Image: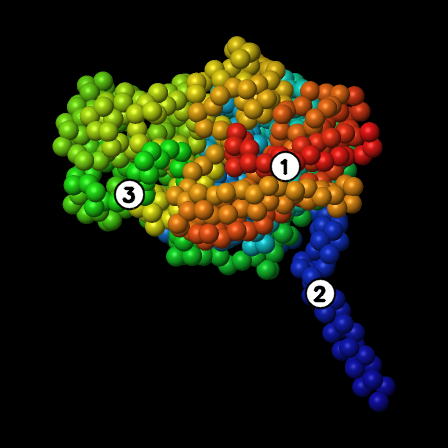
Amino acid sequence: MKKRYLSLLLLVFGAMTASAQTAKPLYLDAKAPVEERVKDALSRMTVHEKIQVLHAQSKFTSAGVPRLGLRQLNMDDGPHGVREELEWNSWSPAKWTNDSIVAFPSLTCLAATWNPELSAVYGNAVSEEFAFRYKDIMLGPGVNIARTPLNGRAFEYMGEDPYLAGRMVVPYIRSAQKNGVACCLKHFALNNQEIDRFAVDVKVSERALREIYLPAFERAVKEAGVWTIMGSYNLWQGAHCCQNDALLNGILKKEWGFDGAVVSDWGGVTDTWQAATGGMDIEMGSYTDGKLKESEFTYDDYYLARPFERLINEGKIPMSVLDDKVARVLRTMFRTSMNPDKAIGSQCSEAHYEACRAIAEEGIVLLRNQKNILPLNADNYGRILVVGENATRSLTEGGGSSELKTLRDISPLEALKALYGDKIDYAKGYSSGRPLYDHVDKVKPELLAQLKAEALEKARKADLIIFIGGLNKNHKQDCENGDRESYDLSFGQNELISELAAIQKNTMVVTFGGNPYAMPWLDRVQALVHCWYLGSESGTALANILSGKVCPSGKLPVTFAKVQNDYPCFQYGKEGYPGNGKEVRYDEGIYVGYRHFDTRGVKTCFPFGFGLSYTTFKYGKPTVTSVDGKTWRVTVDVTNTGNRDGKETVQLYIGDEKCSVDRPKKELKNFAKVSLRPGETKTVTMDITEQDLKFWDEASHGWKAEPGKFRAYVCASAEDVRGVVSFQYGSM
């Protein structure tokens, strides 16, 4: 009996021991609090394993810990769609047959919608494609400010105004991260040019930094809870932003409470000590320490690899610094690669194409429409001539990290032919060469002359000309690692448009591109439509706008100046832009974009917030009421006075009537997009908060609002004021 009892006890004890041995570790329990999981995982990792998760192991992955079941992080470009697969350790395409995707519109196009709901749709759709391709981190979106119209990478960002960029990026991030895909917000910070991007030290006032260049990043951290952030190549206060203690530790992590991981731009780290102590968490890149061939280095030679491990083992850097970095990487893993609720996703679904088309249509901006030539009634014309390279060119190619491999890419010419059939004829008119990264493909002058002559000859037989040109993603146009060299349209487009308009008065211009440009021919053309980069559904979206199937509602997120030198950055000589190779001075301070044009009275070609419709809108008299002394509510009635459905973006700007510091005439602080049927009136309500009245006080190093009178401007654009009301803040 005793033996039986003893055997039973041994069996029970053995079972309990086995159960204990097979129990799931806390860090692998997806239902446990994240911070407890992080603490548990940290306690089980060796120093070497901790180091391994802090740097690249391939072009687009950082390592996990196989011993512990901690999964690697898979990253990929970019904010407009998933980049095609590359070989493990080279920039050559892997030549997969199943990595074609939907190319979504550029972020300038998204900003031009002025529609936060569409931003959420965008974030959801693009992150589903990332999830389907087993990506954990999407390298984007970007919210750097459009300081100069020559910035080769401005198309990846959301315009010149920090409020608009911040308001639009928050729903994008929230929606994407719900699918278990981390957004990697970029480029933090002051990366507002591509010329000398690796070397230029940005000299900017504390006030301009806080009021113009950081707010969109701050909103993404505090309101959207972005999981990862990418540092920028440039320097600030003498230190590269990828290893800048004041920026990454001081502002981002301590002041704003960012708990995610900072990822370097590729090759953005230059020093082990600075990166380790300056807030960098994951070092990505191509090569390190001046070594330019894969054969000359290993990923263990990265600054945050063996060199960092040596400093830790020698006690020169505290273990707490290492553990903080690893904790941030672990949080990212638990939120993405090890998240059991991560979306399965989908690729090239019709829902994604529909989202692409809706964003593109709503982001297209109608800038000119003389005699209501648009929407186009093809019955009024016999032969319609389409001229311009961008009518047929894929605008998803080139651009560097924004280059995409599409399954479907509908061109404007394709879509117009589908609508109007044999009425459509085509002439290329000009050529910009192949989309080569870091290299301009020179076009022979004789070819340009030939293409121009052919277009002019066909123009003489046409009843209507639609010129489709602008910029593209060639080097030194809209492309990383090189800014534009001129405010003019390249490859003789200005001259060609002028000559076409001289031949045929019924000439309209359609432009693509991420930046403003000079328009010496503007008064000679009947219509002007600006399209940014529209993605896979470019042609369909444009055709829907031109034909009137869709009523345009896009508004400019940037100012279109008459001439290049009207932009404030050009008014300080080379020191203001592009700098002297070592530093660039932001001497215009807070007067960027419309703040400069509006306050200084500089006439624009088209102002910030401008965009026409096929219908008309009437604004009533606005009113303002105090809610609690710290919030004010502005209301205004808006009526569709035309004969078709339309959308209007009501913009609310605030001006301080008297202040101890110099302030812009007015600044955007709210907006609302409203849909209206013909004859319909809706009341638009927008709030102003105490924070909206504040400026950055450099004496106290904080935000400050002074008591006094403020004006609320209800506008259809920065120049089109439809009503003004005043209100009092504090006691006089």
> Callout 2: few (<14), some (14-19), or many (20+) C-alpha neighbours within 10 Å?
few
On the image, the x and y values in percent for residue 83 come to: 43, 42
Up-down relation of residue 693 to residue 377 (above or below): above
Q: Which residue is mark 1?
A: 669
N-term-proximal mark, 3 vs 1: 3
Residue type (three-letter) at the residue carrying disc 3: Leu
C-alpha span from label 1 to label 2:
54 Å
N-term-proximal mark, 1 vs 2: 2
Tag on residue 183? Answer: none
262 or 206: which is nearer to us?
206
Secondary structure under the numbered disc 3 in the rendered image: loop
Q: Residue at x 73, y 56 (%)?
A: 33
Foreground: disc 1 or disc 2: 1
Residue type (three-letter) at the residue carrying disc 1: Lys
Q: Residue at x 70, y 26 (%)?
A: 657
Q: Which residue is mark 2?
A: 23
C-alpha span from label 3 to label 2:
69 Å
Up-down relation of residue 192 to residue 536 (above or below): above
Q: Are marks 1 and 2 in contact (CB under 8 Å)?
A: no
Secondary structure under the numbered disc 1 in the rendered image: strand
In the rendered image, the quadrant that contains the C terminus is top right
Q: Which residue is mark 3?
A: 376
Image quarter for residue 520? top left
C-alpha span from label 3 to label 1:
36 Å
Residue type (three-letter) at the residue carrying disc 2: Ala
Q: Are marks 3 and 2 in contact (CB under 8 Å)?
A: no
